[in-house]
Image (cartoon, helix red, strand yellow):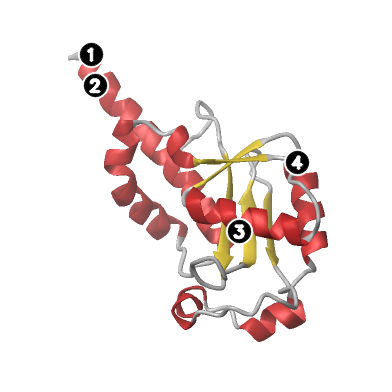
Amino acid sequence: MKDNKNYSFPAILDFEASGFGSDSYPIEVGVVSEFGERYCALIQPKSDWNHWNMDAAQIHKIPRSSLVQLGKPVIQVCEELNTLLEGRRVYCDAWAHDNVWMIKLFHAAAMAPSFYLSPIESIITEAQISIWDDTKKRVQRNLGVLRHRASSDALVIQQTFLESKRASDAGLNKRLQA
């Protein structure tokens, strides 16, 4: 990656889930803060969280048995997220899903998030949107990201934001100088 000293890093949160739809629940959360701090946790399913979609499992490759054995209790995950992100605005690239899973997680812990989750689209420009997919593929290649997991995805989203911002700013500067 290139020098990022002139660009602010947005904090990014990403969830992996048991599937899609109203019965799905978060199984893993990953965060990359604006300072580069990284956090990732498998989430132990609550007793009434039973939905399991095999198509989703093929993508994230996390067996439900790993969640039961190695996952952190929802209260612990919520406490850790609140400590890490307190008072901050955090962005995600699938707000319609991620926000539902965040609400489900915090509701299960009988807690409220101490941070604000917003869609990444609220801070990207049209120029960034136009190059987002190609930039994301390049970032994944450059980072050597081979797995679809929450912490890797959060890093890819953050770096895609930075690279697309840099590229769109460079394109604007060229047009202004012409």
Q: Quadrant of residue 85?
A: top right
Question: In this orientation, which residue lies closer to the viewer: 138 or 71?
Answer: 71
Q: Is residue 26 left or right of residue 157?
A: right
Q: Nearer the viewer, mark 1 or mark 4?
A: 4
| Rendered residue at 51%/73% (across/down) | 60
The residues bearing labels 3 and 1 have C-alpha atoms spaced at a distance of 46 Å
> Secondary structure under badge 2?
helix
Q: Position of residue 70 (x, y in %)?
A: 75, 77
Q: Are marks 3 and 4 in contact (CB under 8 Å)?
A: no
**Residue that mark 1 sits on:** 177
The residues bearing labels 2 and 3 have C-alpha atoms spaced at a distance of 42 Å
**Residue that mark 2 sits on:** 174
**Residue that mark 4 sits on:** 114
Q: Residue furthest left?
A: 178
**Looking at the image, is mark 3 or mark 1 earlier in the sequence?**
3
**Looking at the image, is mark 2 or mark 3 earlier in the sequence?**
3
Three-letter code for the amino acid on which mark 2 is drawn: Lys
Q: Position of residue 27 (x, y in %)?
A: 63, 69
